[in-house]
Image (cartoon, grey):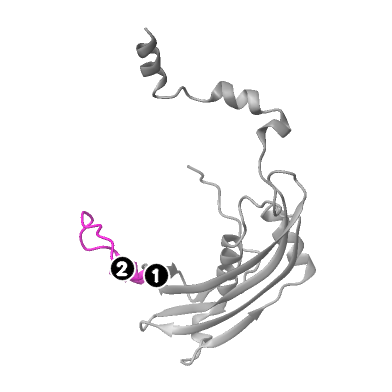
Amino acid sequence: MNDAPEAPAILTRPILVSDIPDLGTELHFEPDVTTYEALAERYGLLAVNRLEANVLIKPWARTGFSVTGRVTGEIIQSCVVTLEPVTSLINEEIDVRLAPLSDAAKYKPRDEDDLSIDQDSRDPPDFYDGGTIDPGSLVEEHFVIGIDPYPRKIGVAFDPARFGLDSVLEETKPPSPFAALTKLKRD
């Protein structure tokens, strides 16, 4: 278990919930070059070329808020096979509901043993504490969700022989479950 405190969001943009009008508020995110560099460093990217987000924050369920929008961007990563630069696109939808932490008990399952899954129901909301919400951290979270964990150049496949690993892979390959039967048949 990691007890280290979570690093604060780079794209943080806290908003007082009392400043959100009944009809909602729209925000546009387009960070500067320094922020691109910080994001690239934190998330192990070669570069962040572009990042934009538009979000709409509206009141939801008397004390909560819905945050909807889209995050788009262009990043450069290292190919997991060749280590050459690979350009990847980010295109993630944001659809999050936030409720005050004081309302958390309302959203707990009534019966811990009843874990039936209803595909038509939504996930419970995320929670905010205090009088602010941070749509910037949600934008950053969805940016990270859009990062391909195993980027690969188009047309490139992993070939163990290319890296001299074919003999190593054969040695570590588990025996076939039919190997014992084949041996019995020969005896």
Please name the residue shown 50% across and 88% down the image.
24
**Circle 2 sits in a helix, a strand or a loop, which is it?**
helix
- Residue toward you, 38 or 87: 87
Picture coordinates of residue 129 (x, y %)? 45, 69
Question: What is the span of residues highlighted in magenta in the rendered image?
Answer: 101-122
Q: Is residue 100 magenta?
A: no
The amino acid marked with disc number 1 is Pro
Picture coordinates of residue 38 (x, y %)? 73, 60
Please name the residue shown 64% across and 23% down the image.
167
| Most frequent secondary structure within the magenta stretch | loop
Quarter of the image for the C terminus: give it: top left
Marker disc for residue 107: 2
Q: How many marks?
A: 2
Q: Quadrant of residue 35 in the image?
A: bottom right
From the viewer's perspective, tell me whether residue 57 is left or right of residue 146.
Answer: left
- Residue toward you, 121 or 99: 121
- Residue lying at the far front of the rendered structure: 186
Measure the alpha-carbon separation of dots 2 and 1.
Answer: 8 Å
Residue at which label 1 appears: 125
The amino acid marked with disc number 2 is Tyr
Q: Are marks 2 and 1 in contact (CB under 8 Å)?
A: yes
